[in-house]
Image (tube, grey):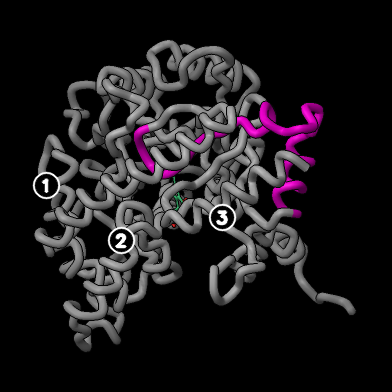
Amino acid sequence: MESHLSTRGEDFAKKKPTFLGVLENAWDPLLNPEGIVNLGLAENTLMHAEMKELMNSKIQVDSHSLTYGDGFSGSRKLKEAICHFLNKNFSPDTALLPSHITVTSGVSNALECSAWALFDQGDHVMVGRPYFNAFRSTFSDRAGVGLLEVEFGKVDPFGLAAIEKYEEALSAARQKGFRVKALLLCSPHNPLGRCYRENVLREYMRLCERHKLHLISDEIYALSVWESPDLPDPVSFKSILSINAAQIMDPSRVHVVWGLSKDFGATGLRIGCLISQSNGRLLEATEGFSLLNFPSSLADSLAASLLMNDTFTSHYLTTNRQRLTQSYDFVTTFLKSHRIPYCQSNAAFFLWIRLGAATADRKATDDEILAKLRNQKVYIAAGYAYASEESGWFRMVFAHPRDVLEEGLKRMLQALAS
Ligand SMILES: Cc1ncc(COP(=O)(O)O)c(C=O)c1O
C-alpha cells in the first residue's frame, strides 16, 4: 500500500523512537510479568505515590484550565509560581521575574524554541560527548540546527581542561566554514550524572564571550542532586542564573531551560520553561510561534499550584534525594558484587555502566549486547546512542522502586551470561 506521504513525512516516519515498543509492553509484576523492564527511559517513579496524592486531593481545577488561559506562553500565575520556586531553589544573582520566562510544553520544546529563535538553518551548537541523545533531534529535526560534537579523549569532561577541547573543536569547525553559534551545557549532566564546579561554569562563560557564543544551560536535573555513597566530596549543583553574567559575558546570550519532568518525576505533565533574563526579544520571538506548542492550561494550573506549595515541594525534594541515594546504593552494590564497572555519580538518575567489560562473550559488540538485553526483556540504553566516545558503555536509570530494579538487574545478568 502506498503511504502518500511527503518526502519529509517519510523522513519522520523513519524516526519513530524505538523505545515506544518498550512502553507498549511495560513489565508489571502482576498485570504483565512477561513484559519489558524499562531501565532505559529517563523517568523517576520514586515519588509517584506522593505526587498522585497531592494532585488527586489538593488541587482544584477552575474554568481557566478549560480555556486558552492568559495567552500562549504560560499563565501569569504559573510564571509567578516558577519565579517563586526558582528564586528559592536556584539562588539567581538577579531575582527572576515573570517577564524573563516563556512556558513551554516540556524542556525539549523549550530547547527547540531556542533553536528556532536564536539560530538559522545550518547553524551549529557545540555539545560535549557523551550527550543526551534527543538533543540532536530537538535541534535538527525541524529547526535544522546541527550539533558540533566535542570529544574529550582522556580529559575529564567536568574539568577546566575540557574547555580547551571546545576551543579546538570550535576553531577547527570555523576553519571549515561551519557557523557555530552556541554552546549547550547539560548541568547536571545526562548521561554522566555529575555537576560542574562554579569556576568551570565561569570559564565556559568566558569562552562564550571570547567567541560570541550563546550559552544554553539545560538544568532539568538541577534539584535531583543527592548524597552519593561513592563521592564523599561531591560537586553540588550551581545554576548559571546564580552567576552575575554581566561581569563575564554578554548577558543577552545566557539562557536556561528547566521543567517539571525530572525534578518532579512528571514527564507526562509537559511543563518546561525557557528563561532568559536579559533578552526579552528572544522571548517575544518564542511567543511568535507559541500557538503551535503551548502547554495545556490544565497542566499549567496544576504546575502553578504545585510550585506555590512550599511545604509539599520542600518535603518532595528532600525525600526524592533520599530515595535516589538509596536506589543508587542498591544498584551500585549489586554492580560491584558482579564486577560490572560504572562511573560514580551524584546527580540525575543514571548509572553509566560498562556492560562490554562484563559479558561472558568479551567480543560481543554493543549491538549484540543490546540484542541479549532485548531477549531477556530488559531495556537499558546503549552508550553509542549518547555519542559515547568508547564502546561498551550503557546508560541505566535507577530511579525506580526496588522490585523493578531487582527484576531488571536479574534479567541484565542473564543477558550478560548468555
Ligand atoms: C537533559 C535533558 N533535557 C531535556 C529533556 C526533555 O525533557 P522533557 O520531557 O521536559 O521534554 C530530557 C529528558 O530526558 C533530558 O534528559
| Circle count | 3
Residue contact between numbered discs 1 and 3, judged by CB atoms under 8 Å: no
- Indicate left or right for 183 with 277 as reference: right
Residue contact between numbered discs 3 and 2, judged by CB atoms under 8 Å: no
Amino acid type at mark 1: Lys
- Indicate left or right for 289 with 356 as reference: left
Q: Would you place residue 377 above or below residue 331 in this image?
A: below
* Residue at image coords 33%, 24%: 231
Residue 179 in percent (x, y) is at 55, 30
Residue ID for mark 2: 103
Residue 358 highlighted magenta (yes or no): yes
* Residue at image coords 44%, 31%: 183
Marks 1, 2: nearer the viewer: 1
The magenta stretch is: 346-375
Residue ID for mark 1: 88
Residue 177 in percent (x, y) is at 62, 24
Residue ID for mark 3: 407
Residue farthest right in this picture: 1
Question: Residue 75 versus residue 120: which sits nearer the camera?
Answer: 75
Residue 286 in percent (x, y) is at 37, 57
Amino acid type at mark 2: Val
N-terminal-most mark, 1 or 3: 1
